[in-house]
Structure formats: structure tokens, C-alpha cells
Image (cartoon, grey):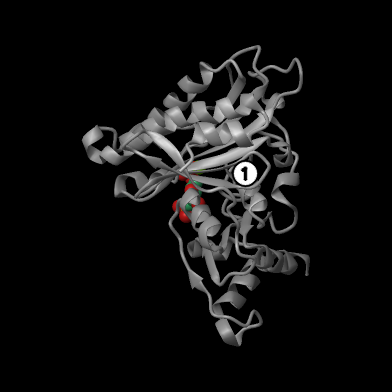
């Protein structure tokens, strides 16, 4: 089985991007180790502080953020970073050309109950002369991403990434501390009968989304003509991993709980990187109205409505929004 460094050398045309992905994996291996020790690592529970979005941080959110930051700051290729856990972008090395945006530990409400979480990353190229400390440097559409991926910390630790030429999956072999290639061309089946959505928000959705899910629930007798099954892990990484493995549709759509937040998930380090992976694997990613990766971001922590997965099912949802 091919090791990650050899695979990157062979398949990634940009050596800087390859080094950044390898560097990120040093931090992710450390996070994986700590998560697998669980309560024995002494890092469970709340950090008793809030992030910029008013969410209560877990100790492991903070530790994971610090581990990744430390790794990236030491890399000459990295101009700056932006994180879910940092209010503002952080400048790294003035000679670097790349920006790394990340959610250090997504789905962290799952940590204390020993359920899958993950790290999500997106890599952008900075304009010449741009500053790593300025938000404007980072505000590029998802279609500009040069690479994106996630590391899933589940029963095994899996890396899934794309540098724009398909999606590749690796598993961490903890015996040798290396990511080994599992599948060099991950593809999402075009159709599905499995959906993932947090149904408790139903009354807050747009009428279009309410109509689509109502039709889903009608099964064989409804206009969609098939019986669907449902999953909800409350960990986007786990949800997208399932979809990249066997198809499906994941939705965290717009809701009007708080009109200032169009959806719960963040565009730049959740919506965009996951959209790149889904699209590179043959699926689709939309807000219901627009392609997620076409959105011109206005803020680092901007929210976005996410509907992504098997291409035919996402097109069906887009159809409900158009009509
Ligand atoms: P987080 O970045 O604070 O962990 O929030 C993102 C997570 C996603 O992984 C998941 O899809 C969603 O929040 C679950 O939210 P909810 O608890 O509302 O179902
Ligand atoms: Mg998150």
C-alpha cells in the first residue's frame, strides 16, 4: 500500500501544497492519538470559554487548534491561517504563498460521547503581496481552492483529500504512524435513497425544503417514488464520509432561527472544502439556489446553507427551490 508522501510526490503537481498537506497530517496524527486515548488523555470536557461565534469550546477544540496552528506557523509555504476557533486570521510566514483555513475539530459535541469527529481543511493561494493577517486576503470563492480535505477520527483514522484531480482516501496505520492509500479515485453514486438532516429544525426551514422532505417521507407512494432511510450523526465529517463511501444526501439548509445566520455551517472551512470533495467525486453541492463554491465570501466566519451529495438527489432538491 502506497504511503502518503510517495503518493503526493507522484500525484500532486504543486510541491508546496504537498508539503502543507504532509505538515497538517503531523498535527492530525497527534489529535488522533489524543482522541483515541479518550478520557485517559485528561482532555475531555469544556474549556469553559466561548469562540468568536459564541459556541462553548471543548478542551480538545482548543488543543487541536493549537496543534494545527503550531504546525502551519512553522511552514515557510504558509502565508496565513484562519480557523473556526480564531476570531481573526493569523499571519504565518511573509514569504509563503498559501492560506490554510480549517475547522480543527468538527462535530465536537460528539467528543464526550465517544462518537466520530474530524478536522476539515481548505487551501487557497494568496494574491501576490497580500497579507496573511487581513481577512480580505482569504475571501475567495470555493472554486479557487487548490486543495481541500478532512481527517476523520473514528474507529480508524481516515484522510480524504483532493488537489483538484479526484478524491483520494488514506487510512492511518498507527503501528507505523503513516497514512496508507485505500482508494485513489473515490466516486459518489449518482442516485441514493439515504438522507441526512436534523429534523428538529423542520419548522424553521424554507417552504421549498419543507416540501422536499415531506415528499421524501411519503416514500414509494410519494412523487419521488422510493422509500428513503435517514441518518444523523451531528458530525459533518462523518456524514460526508458516509456519502463519499456509499452515496447519500447531506443537508444543513437555511433556517430562520436566527435571520443573521443562513444555516449553521460555515462557508470557508466547512461548506467549501466539503463541496470541493463532493464535486471532485462526481457529486453536487448547492445552497438550494446556487453552487456553494461559486459564492463570493464576505466574511471568514460566514454561514451557508449546505445541500450536498449524490448528484441526482441534489438536482432534485435544487428543482424544488427553482419551482
Ligand atoms: P461545530 O463546528 O461547532 O462542531 O458544528 C458543526 C457541526 C457539524 O459537524 C454538524 O453537521 C452540525 O454541527 C450538527 O449540528 P446540530 O447539533 O444542530 O445537528
Ligand atoms: Mg465545524
- Residue sitting at 57 percent across and 43 percent down? 270
Instruction: Give the position of the C terminus as an image quadrant.
Output: bottom right
- Which residue occupies the foreground of this view, 186 or 128? 186
Instruction: Give the position of the N terminus as an image quadrant.
Output: top left
- Which residue occupies the foreground of this view, 241 or 296? 241
- Residue sitting at 46 percent across and 52 percent down? 238
Q: Is residue 45 above or below residue 184?
A: above
Numbered-mark total:
1
- Which residue occupies the foreground of this view, 313 or 200? 313
Quarter holding residue 20: top right
Left or right position of 213 against 315? left
Question: Disc 1 designates what residue?
Answer: 303
Which x, y percent locates residue 153? 40, 44
Which x, y percent locates residue 6? 53, 33
Q: Is residue 300 visible?
A: no
Q: As drawn, which residue projects farthest toward the top? A: 94
- Cβ of mark 1 under 8 A from ligand 1: no
- Residue sitting at 26 percent across and 38 percent down? 37
Which x, y percent locates residue 24? 50, 29
Helix, strand or loop under label 1:
loop
Left or right position of 303 against 288? left
- Residue sitting at 63 percent across and 37 percent down? 11
Q: Residues within 10 Å of mark 1 (few under 14, many from 20)?
A: many
Q: As drawn, which residue projects farthest toward the left? A: 40
Which x, y percent locates residue 266? 59, 42
Q: Is residue 222 visible?
A: yes
Amino acid at each position: 500500500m502506497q504511503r502518503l508522501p510517495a503518493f503526493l510526490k507522484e500525484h500532486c503537481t504543486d510541491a508546496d501544497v504537498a508539503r502543507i498537506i504532509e505538515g497538517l497530517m503531523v498535527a492530525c496524527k497527534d489529535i488522533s492519538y489524543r482522541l483515541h486515548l479518550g478520557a485517559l488523555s485528561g482532555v475531555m470536557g469544556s474549556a469553559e470559554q466561548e469562540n468568536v461565534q459564541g459556541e462553548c469550546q471543548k478542551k480538545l477544540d482548543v488543543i487541536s487548534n493549537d496543534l494545527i496552528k503550531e504546525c502551519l506557523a512553522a511552514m515557510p509555504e504558509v502565508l496565513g491561517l484562519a480557523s473556526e476557533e480564531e476570531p481573526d486570521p493569523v499571519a504565518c510566514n511573509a514569504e509563503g504563498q498559501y492560506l490554510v483555513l480549517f475547522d480543527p475539530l468538527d462535530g465536537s459535541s460528539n467528543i464526550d460521547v465517544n462518537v466520530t469527529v474530524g478536522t476539515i481543511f481548505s487551501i487557497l493561494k494568496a494574491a501576490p503581496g497580500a497579507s496573511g493577517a487581513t481577512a480580505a486576503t482569504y475571501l475567495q470563492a470555493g472554486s479557487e481552492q487548490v486543495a481541500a480535505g478532512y481527517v476523520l477520527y473514528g474507529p480508524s483514522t481516515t484522510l480524504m483529500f483532493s488537489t483538484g484531480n479526484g478524491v483520494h482516501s488514506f487510512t492511518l496505520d498507527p503501528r507505523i504512524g503513516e497514512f496508507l492509500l485505500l482508494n485513489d479515485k473515490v466516486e459518489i453514486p449518482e442516485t441514493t435513497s439515504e438522507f441526512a438532516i436534523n429534523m428538529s429544525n423542520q419548522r424553521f426551514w424554507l417552504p421549498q425544503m419543507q416540501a422536499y422532505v415531506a415528499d421524501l417521507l411519503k416514500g414509494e407512494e410519494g412523487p419521488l417514488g422510493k422509500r428513503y432511510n435517514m441518518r444523523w450523526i451531528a458530525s459533518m465529517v462523518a456524514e460526508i464520509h458516509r456519502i463519499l463511501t456509499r452515496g447519500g444526501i447531506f443537508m444543513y439548509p437555511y433556517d430562520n432561527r436566527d435571520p443573521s445566520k443562513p444555516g449553521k455551517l460555515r462557508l470557508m472551512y466547512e461548506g467549501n472544502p466539503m463541496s470541493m470533495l463532493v464535486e471532485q467525486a462526481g457529486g453536487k453541492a448547492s445552497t438550494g439556489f446556487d453552487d456553494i463554491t461559486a459564492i463570493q465570501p464576505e466574511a471568514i466566519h460566514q454561514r451557508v446553507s449546505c445541500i450536498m451529495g449524490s448528484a441526482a438527489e441534489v438536482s432534485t432538491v435544487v428543482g424544488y427551490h427553482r419551482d
